[in-house]
Image: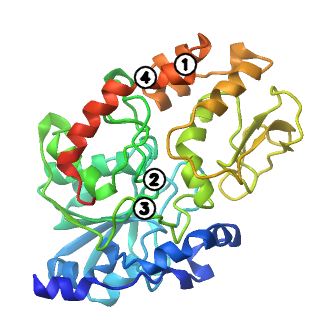
Amino acid sequence: MKYLLSTCIICLGYLTISSSCGLNRHFENSRRNTEKEVTISSIKTGADRYSFYLPLLKDKKVGVITNQTGILSNNVHLVDFLIENKISVQKIFAPEHGFRGTADAGELIKDGKDTKTGLPIISLYGNNKKPKPEQLAGIDIIVFDLQDVGARFYTYISSLHYIMEACAENNTELMILDRPNPNGTIVDGPILEKEFTSFVGMHPIPLLHGMTIGEYGRMINGEKWLKNGIQCNLKVIHCIDYNREMSYSLPVKPSPNLPNDQSINLYASLCLFEGTNVSVGRGTEMQFQIYGSPFLPKSDFSFTPIPNFGAKDPVYKNQLCFGENLTSIPKVNQLELKWLIKAYNSTSDKSKFFNDFFTKLAGTKKLQQQIVDGVSETEIRKSWEKGLNDFNEMRKKYLIYN
């Protein structure tokens, strides 16, 4: 124990990120307000606790599920680091957006080969969300290192579910290298109802769950949510000197359309618009920080989506959209419904406002009906209270951090 403590108190060195990490200037500028909070802490992610996990990987055949977020504090990618340290990495498994994090949301990711290492890359998106037995053959342990943002419909936790299930069925160990949740203080929203289970919502949890991905893995195991109640041989390499009240700015974009801290904070609230005829700014440089459509009233703020990195064919491509700019609003501390309600009440075509995807995102039919019926945001929130109270009680059993 003395050895572990002596090796884990290291200051996070994320402030010297190079352009090779895919960190654009817009994202970098948005982090400046939180640099002080991050650097004065001694947060150490699971990936940086290599003195602890490297001995556990020695002499084992290893698979890795990760993407561009899987970096150590010296900006070295986890896969490169493991190879440099003579760990026998056999395969890379890639989630939505791919291994390098360059694919659009929902875009088909093909199997391939990493040009740097020559390792085979297995896509875990599309028709192959769960590793097949033959894809795990010869692998002793899977290392999972993905940066989550704390929202139920962010599909990395769905990938985690299927990885855990495959590992349990094939007697393969799973190691999660934990990372802070940038929305870790927020537990809010309707609980997913079982009949609306999908890849954008697999478990009976609220839209914002307030857990790290390591804590979430513990919950999947503990609640026996895997098929037939099986459980995975799971080890979580937790963060050091982290608590969920800390401001935490991500060093790398977690996905192409979350370019900065503001978008990550607003993601859960604005993602509900993806189940409507309103754009959330895909095809602009302000994704998940603005919303608008041709059907909303003309206003001082407008934008015109065009194809760009992460949005090859954005909603309302080349069409003028009117809406609201949220790039400079204060950080939100709950799931905000006011913009969704405002847009519905002011759209010129209410009959086409919601689409079928909204119910999948919300995890319930009730929210759409409440908005259509003119139920106030206060009353809508009251309808979530019992579900949130029950979830918070269950959640306590799996928390690692204060």
Kindly identify which numbered label has been placed on residue 368: 1
Label 4 crowd (10 A; few <14 / some 14-19 / many >=20): few
Of badges 3 and 1, nearer the viewer stands: 1
| Amino acid under disc 1 | Gln
Helix, strand or loop under label 4: helix
Residue tagged by mark 2?
Answer: 183
Of badges 2 and 4, nearer the viewer stands: 4
Kindly identify which numbered label has been placed on residue 261: none
Of badges 4 and 1, nearer the viewer stands: 4
Work out how far the residue at label 4 is from the one at label 1, CA to CA, in angstroms.
15 Å
Q: Earlier in the sequence, mark 4 or mark 3?
A: 3
Work out how far the residue at label 2 is from the one at label 1, CA to CA, in angstroms.
24 Å
At 55% from the left edge and 52% from the top edge, which residue is drawn?
265
| Amino acid under disc 2 | Asn
| Amino acid under disc 3 | Gln
Corner quadrant of residue 2: bottom left
At 76% from the left edge and 36% from the top edge, which residue is drawn?
292
Q: 184 or 165, which is in the foreground?
A: 184
| Amino acid under disc 4 | Lys
| Above or below: residue 150 compared with residue 270 | below
Helix, strand or loop under label 2: loop
Residue tagged by mark 4?
Answer: 382
